[in-house]
Image (tube, rainbow, N blue to C red):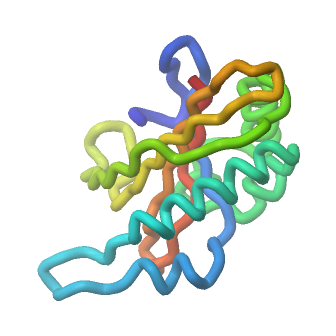
Amino acid sequence: MASVDLLRGGLLVMLLAISPLPSAWAQAASATPSTTAPMLSPDAAVDGALQVAALVDAGRAGELWDGASPVVKRVVARAVFIDGLAASRKPKGAVAGREWRVVRRQRHDGTQGVPAGHYVSVELLARLASGEQMRELVSLRLDEDGVARFSGYVVE
């Protein structure tokens, strides 16, 4: 992720955010000693990514944006978010199943076009009803209030 709007593999990538995720996420983002930042557990990240993907599947992009982190709302308008998500995801069709592949943790200092903070990215492999496969990348940001929120979705 390098900015709000950029091309990656020919597809539009957007930084996004959703409302605070279930309380289990907030609990999973536990504080560690003062020399280390809070971390989101890999299990909580996978659970959240699967919830986000289910909302995308259901066409509920507006709900995702409505609960967006202020970081995201400053850089992408609601209508642009909804249209961009539909344009990248809808042509792929229905999902028959999905599983997680990789969980990555990243810390950005704000100098690379991504707002500073701690992020967790979850790579998902979706099996489409057509029999094809689709790779999705869902990113979560641990916001300043200690709550993990959705911060990115890419279809590859």
Residue 90 at x, y = what percent? 82, 27
Hey, which quadrant is residue 116 in on the image?
bottom left
* Number of numbered callouts drawn: 0
Assign the C terminus to one quadrant of the image.
top right
Return the residue found at the far left: 35
Q: Is residue 58 left or right of residue 102?
A: right
Q: Position of residue 39 (x, y in %)?
A: 33, 72
The residue drawn where x is 51% and y is 24% is 6
Q: On the rendered structure, is 36 left or right of 63?
A: left
The quarter of the rendered structure image containing the N terminus is top left
Q: Residue at x 48, y 20 (%)?
A: 8
Query: Can the viewer see residue 15 in this picture?
Result: no
Q: Residue furthest front?
A: 131
Task: Identify the residue at horizontal 50%, vertical 49% (top origin).
Answer: 139
| Residue 23, horizontal then vertical, whole percent | 61, 84
Task: Specify whether residue 7 is in view.
Answer: yes
* Residue 100 rendering spot, x and y as whole percentages: 52, 47
